[in-house]
Image: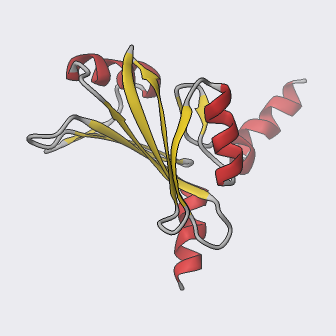
Amino acid sequence: MLLYLVVLLACPSVRAQHMDFCGVELTGSIRDVSDKLRKSGFKLKQKRPDDCFYIFEGKYCGQTTYFNVNYTPKTKTVYQVRVTPRNINEEVLVDSLLAKYGSECESTGEGYCWTTEAGGIFYIKKEHYDPFVVIIDGEGMTLKKQEEK
């Protein structure tokens, strides 16, 4: 059993996880992520296949929240999700992110950034806008860059 744990922890591909938000792993095809979001209570509000994104609506921190799910045009792999909670207390949002992703983050002029082997979480607060969160899946972003070539 100990040997199994050592091998598991030593192997980066096994250790690497995909990004998740609200308990939903944000990886794979747009169909897979859509199914996961629906099972978690989010409703599909709009499909924009020409622009390669879907919009979902649900609750986060007790407030109406929109998920803009971007995917690659060829493989339909999700690479980025933009989470926009409406009318949310900024302190509550930041506290929820700190609780989920830890206090080891980089503070920027517009918010915070958490990065891992799997991707990144970016909390952004722009003047005159509700704060929002951008979640980037590392594998999905790599596919996106490959498809752009």
Answer with left or right where residue 52 lies relative to residue 7: left
Query: What is the x, y in percent for residue 108?
Result: 19, 44
Which corner quadrant of the image does residue 96 belong to? top left
User: In the image, 147: left or right of 15?
Assistant: left
Q: Is residue 113 above or below residue 148?
A: above
Q: Relative to 105, does residue 144 appear above or below in the rendering?
A: below
Choose between 104 and 22: the one closer to the eye. 22
For the C terminus, the image quarter is bottom right
Which residue is painted at 65% across and 43% down in the image? 33
* Residue at left offset 28%, top offset 28%: 86
State the residue at coordinates (26%, 21%). Answer: 88
Question: What residue lies at 59% left-to-right and 78% top-to-bottom?
Answer: 147
Residue 18 makes an appearance in the image: yes
Residue 67 % position (x, y): 45, 40
| Residue 22, image x, y percentages | 52, 26
Rendered location of residue 27, percent (x, y): 64, 47
The answer to whether 132 appears left or right of 3 in the picture is left
Query: Exactly how many numbered labels are in the figure?
Result: 0
Dividing the image into 4 quarters, which one contains the N terminus?
top right
Please say if 116 is above or below 36: below
Compare residues 23 and 36 and report the one nearer the observer: 36
